[in-house]
Amino acid sequence: MDWRLLHRRCPRITPAGLIDTLRLARHLKTTTGNGLAHLVAHHGLAEQINTLAADSQPHRALWDTVAAAVLLTTLIDRVWPGQPTIGELAAAAALRIEGNSQPAAEGQPPLTFE
């Protein structure tokens, strides 16, 4: 998702955190390209994405969203041998959201990326 666009259109949305696929790809240090289309091609994901978003194409919301989701799971599988904790994922790829501090519901620990 493009956080800047989402925040501009829906300023009241306050996620606990954001995971950046570009940061995760850079963590792997396997490619110099940084665009979504380049990363999809580099990891051989285009056919899978085109199947999942059959009526869409690159640079359209559906295709780009599916591509980001498929790329995220692919990158996670390549970085960690098992399922990472949210802390491990955040350490590798989190984006800070300034001024976004909401209290947790009563009895629920806060979600932090510290």
Image (cartoon, helix red, strand yellow):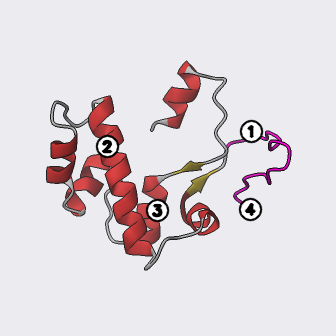
Neighbour class for label 4 at 10 Å: few (<14), some, many (≥20)? few
C-beta proximity under 8 Å, tags 1 and 2:
no
Using the image as rendered, state which of residue 113 and residue 99 is in the foreground.
113
Quarter residue 90 falls in: bottom right
Decide which of tag 4 and tag 1 comes sooner along the chain. Answer: 1
Residue at 74% of width from left, 62% of height from top?
114
* Foreground tag (1 vs 2): 2
Query: What is the CA distance from the residue labelled 4 to the residue labelled 1?
Result: 14 Å
Using the image as rendered, state which of residue 73 and residue 109 is in the foreground.
109
**Main secondary structure along the magenta-highlighted residues:** loop
Quarter residue 50 falls in: top left
Residue 24 numbered mark, or none: 3
| Residue under numbered circle 4 | 114
Residue at the limit of the structure toward the bottom, as seen here:
81
| Count of marks, rendered view | 4
Decide which of tag 4 and tag 2 comes sooner along the chain. Answer: 2
Query: What is the CA distance from the residue labelled 3 to the residue labelled 1?
Result: 22 Å
Q: Secondary structure at mark 3?
A: helix
Q: Secondary structure at mark 1?
A: loop
